[in-house]
Amino acid sequence: MSAVELRARPSTRFFRSELWLIFGRRRNWVGMAVLAAVPVLLIIAVKVSPPGGGGGPDFVNQITQNGVFAALAALTLELPLFLPVAVASISADSIAGEANLGTLRYLLAVPVDRVRLLVVKFAAIAVFALAATLLVAGVGALLGLAVFGGGPLVTLSGTTLPFWAGVGRLVLVCGYLTVCLTAMGAIGMFVSTLTEQPIGATIATLVLTVGSEILDAIPQLAVIHRYLPTHYWLAYTDLLRDPVSYDQVVPGLWSATAYILIFGAAAWARFAGRDVTS
Amino acid sequence: MTDLAVVSTGLTKRFRSGQVAVNTVDLAVPYGSVYGFLGPNGSGKTTTIRLLLGLVRPTAGTHRLLGSAMPGAAARVLPRVGALVEGPAFHPYLSGLDNLRRLDAADRTVEPRSAGARIDAALDRVGLLAARRKRYRHYSLGMRQRLAIAAALLRPRDLLILDEPTNGLDPQGTREVRSLLSALSATGTTVVLSTHLLSEVEQICSHVGVMHLGRLVAQGPLAELRARTAPSVEVRSADAAGAARVLTELGLTEVVTVGETATGVLGGVVPEKVVAALVHADVPVRGFQVRSADLEEMFVQLTGEGFDVSG
Ligand SMILES: Nc1ncnc2c1ncn2[C@@H]1O[C@H](COP(=O)(O)OP(=O)(O)O)[C@@H](O)[C@H]1O
Ligand SMILES: [Mg+2]
């Protein structure tokens, strides 16, 4: 019957523990090694057999002129599947993984408030999305610069930006893609509250993401395209125009925000009152 | 009400499957007691514990922990409650130490700087200090159980709710855990432990609640419950039939003869009177014994069945 009143202090300990759980896990290292391998392979391939020049939005042809383009090319290659797989596996594991292990009941008994758990899990997903994007871009940019050297950045509009302005554009691209992938992570976290099977939740999240990409590719479905979660992902190329075009980027940010709010709320609605019997 | 560490009224849980796992349970666990929550597998012990901790929402009923209404007071009360629910559960690829660090990090009401010392103390109490850097997946069942108990002891607790804490432990480990619980109880911690082992209750519990098919069929101080169950006499005699006749005439119930032994439930009859009557009736008595019901018999009397799994 201790009379001591227990006060909860604001603390980042649990959030840091969550990051450490994600970034300390061997499975995730393997995943991140795969993400990092793509720019490495790409740079080796371009070094061994340089492309014939010319432009094009796949960026591969520009790598020999400016190594930073290796980052953009690698992001372009990984955006349809590898990056979504990475974010899906982390986000779908968030609640379902703990439920599957049974650690969820012990976290809740600590107690960790259920809303706080979702907020911490979501924040960690966002950090992972950023880390995955920066990993691909960072390996691509650094190795690209080491192999091919730096130089001015030729924008998609044909103008030329000085080297550091080009790097700035790359940072903007990474930020935009992080937001897009984080929105997908919110969907994954919601799916994760529906089941105790993390693998099933990962697959479901991927089916939703790739399904969205497929629907987006069917012109007859144009009316629904702008509501698809992946529809604005490719708008990152607009950040490489001169001047930057925000016609697609701004709606892309709104779309991502809407997905984060809607699926965050859905995860809360589902999880807040759920019986934890795992 | 204020002298109860755990109190529930009408606590009921009907799962979506329709199964009523917990049925109008009125728990009353006094402060400072070691409360044995006894019942066969499937009788609703774990579900009751989940209800107490707020993991599962009750279909009906309310409860208070340490004087505060749950689940509203969870943030204030649960840090003072150490719990073990349906066996250990940890991240397999983390060490025992790292698993405890994670749980401690999740608790916003503790002093972060003392984490290392508190974790080591908890590991030491359960004898896991030497194995703390091993990955959890390489722990034996008993070590896992010990780690779960260590997690419940990460900080001083006013109440421990432990679901079958000696499951999977070897006899040595079982003894250690029992003496650990006795020591904690001696310092004022209230302990609720669920078990399907009668011997466990007999050895360390001051109070007992008996679950059967989701209902709390008996509850109270152990001694009181024992007294409630009727003692019986056992007469060994060459004339067992004659002895049985005497017992029946005296008003004993459930009189049975098996070979040379006649038994009967004493009811209000004093044993001395039985002996006198037997002598008076010239029944040759070779042996006479008064048996108070042991816990197992008490259990059978309460539940009307053996110690089987209830569905
Ligand atoms: N999530 C659930 N859904 C449906 N029935 C359940 C669930 N959890 C437990 N039960 C049922 O409730 C009853 C009590 O289970 P439990 O509380 O685990 O018993 P105990 O811990 O005493 O062995 C059992 O019949 C069990 O099958
Ligand atoms: Mg159980």
Image (cartoon, grey):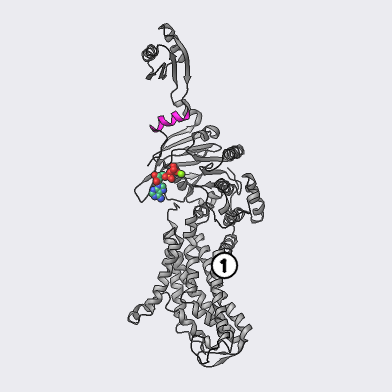
Which residues make up the magenta segment? B293-305
Toward the viewer: B56 or B18? Answer: B18
Side (left or right) of B229 relative to B118: left
Q: Amino acid at mark 1?
A: Trp
The residue pinned by badge 1 equals: A29
Secondary structure beneath label 1: helix
Q: Which residue is depicted at the point 63% across and 44% down? A: B125
Does B301 lie within the magenta span? yes
The x and y percentages for residue B194 are: 49, 40
Asked where in the image residue B95 lies, by quadrant, the reply is bottom right
Residue A167 visible here: yes
Q: Which residue is depicted at the point 63% across and 83% down? A: A146
User: Could you tell me which chain the residue with mark 1 belongs to?
Assistant: A
Toward the viewer: B57 or A3? Answer: B57
- Residue at the extreme left of the image, as rendered: A220
Residue B118 visible here: no
- Residue at the extreme front of the image, as rendered: A48
The x and y percentages for residue A278 are: 45, 52
Please tell me how crowded label 1 is: few (under 14), some (14-19), or many (20+) other residues with Cα within 10 Å: few
The x and y percentages for residue B130 are: 66, 49
Asked where in the image residue B264 lies, by quadrant, the reply is top left
